[in-house]
Image: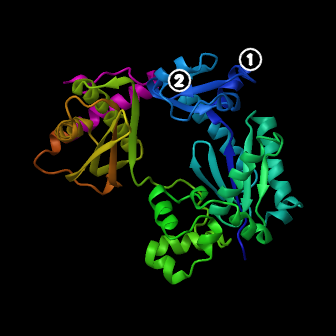
Amino acid sequence: MKRVIALVDCNNFFVSCERLLKPELIGKPVCVLSNNDGCVVSRSNEAKKMGVEMGAPYFIAKNQFKKVIFLSGNLPYYCEISKRVMDKLQDFTPDIEIYSIDEAFLDLTGLRKTFNCSYEEITERIVKDIKEEIGIDVSVGLSYSKVLAKLANDKAKNLQKTLPDKKTYKIGYRQIKEELKGTLISEIWGIGRNTQALLNKYLIQTAYDFISQDDIWIKKKMGKIGLDMKQELLGNSISPVIAGDIAPKSISRSESFKEFQTDKNYIQEQLNSHIHKVCKKLREENQMTSCISVMLRTKDFQVENIKLNLAYPINIEFDLIEKSKEMLNQIFKKGVIYRSVGFCAYKLTSAETQQISIFDSNQTLKKQELLKSCDKLEERFGRGIIKLGILNKK
């Protein structure tokens, strides 16, 4: 039995959320900025038409686009609206996989009988209900696999440029090959630049060119991932919709600076803040990390990255900040201009399964209790209410 998969994607989500609070912004060119007003992370259709690029640095965009309204982001508010959207989707099916703050995959298989209508009509009801009850516009792509649902969603958004009311798009079984003939391989979800370059080297330009290749050739060049991609494009669901919360494989934080930087002390301070946020998230998830990385991105978007395997799993920023200083020293280059810094925790394991070393158990327990108390204070009074000395230590 073929699965029927839908991808629901909120349109210009952060801007749409802001317009719920400020209806006077409707119809105007609006952009929402990342933390610390670093770069553009959401654009209204009006701003897109003016040429504002996603990820454009604010200090450049504000001078280049004088008529655009730039707003500081409000992530807690956006998360609240996102939860309302995801809760509404539960009215249609419990089989929901939240892919990001503004996207979710739904498995609608067999629900025609439940709703006594076609799958297309179900997606139209989803669009209508979310708009009327929450005030957010969504686009819905419908097909037989996640990859095709994502492609259908992209088609729906492209159609909206000329047909604003066209919020849904279906790729039926008979339409798959024709759709793929008109789709560049670079437009397929999961095909990165390196894979695109590899396939282009063998004159594979479209998604149809790709599915026309022999399985043996695809396996040789791309392995199992390539074979799975081919099946997904043919309408066979290889990656099912997985409902429920899934423990993350990693937790990361990165952020563009308000201004380009060459000051290592400033960069370390920002890195310390990221480490604090990651560790707080680890404690919330009852997780520990045994591998960390520090990333620096230059003005020209070149990336320097370094990883470190830890002797034992931890979730305490006091320890990780000290280690990050050594890592930053290894990749920081004097005179180079940087635009952002990031931190990531990998190889996550449950804190319940970890045993504290007998040599530092008392000290570690004291640190954990102190940080848990700080976490509670931040939850009650807001982020930043407590300033740990080590976060500002140079």
Q: SS at mark 2? A: helix
- Residue 80 vs 225, above or below: the answer is above
**Most common secondary structure along the magenta stretch:** helix
Q: Mark 2 or mark 1: name the one nearer the start of the chain.
A: 1
Q: Which residues are magenta?
A: 365-394
- Which kind of residue does numbered mark 1 sit on? Glu
Any magenta on residue 279? no
Image mark count: 2
Circle 2 packing at 10 Å, graded few (<14), some (14-19), many (20+), is some
State the residue in front, 28 or 182.
182
Residue 213, given in percent of the width and then of the height, sits at 58, 78
Q: Which quarter of the rendered picture does the N terminus lie within?
A: bottom right
Residue occupying the point 83% across, 50% down: 124
- Which kind of residue does numbered mark 2 sit on? Ala
Residue 238 visible in the current orientation: no
Residue occupying the point 49% across, 57% down: 192
Query: Mark 1 — residue?
Result: 24
Indicate the quadrant where residue 367 lies.
top left
Left or right, 377 with respect to 353, comes to right
Q: SS at mark 1? A: helix
Q: Which quarter of the rendered picture does the C terminus lie within?
A: top left
Query: Mark 2 — residue?
Result: 61
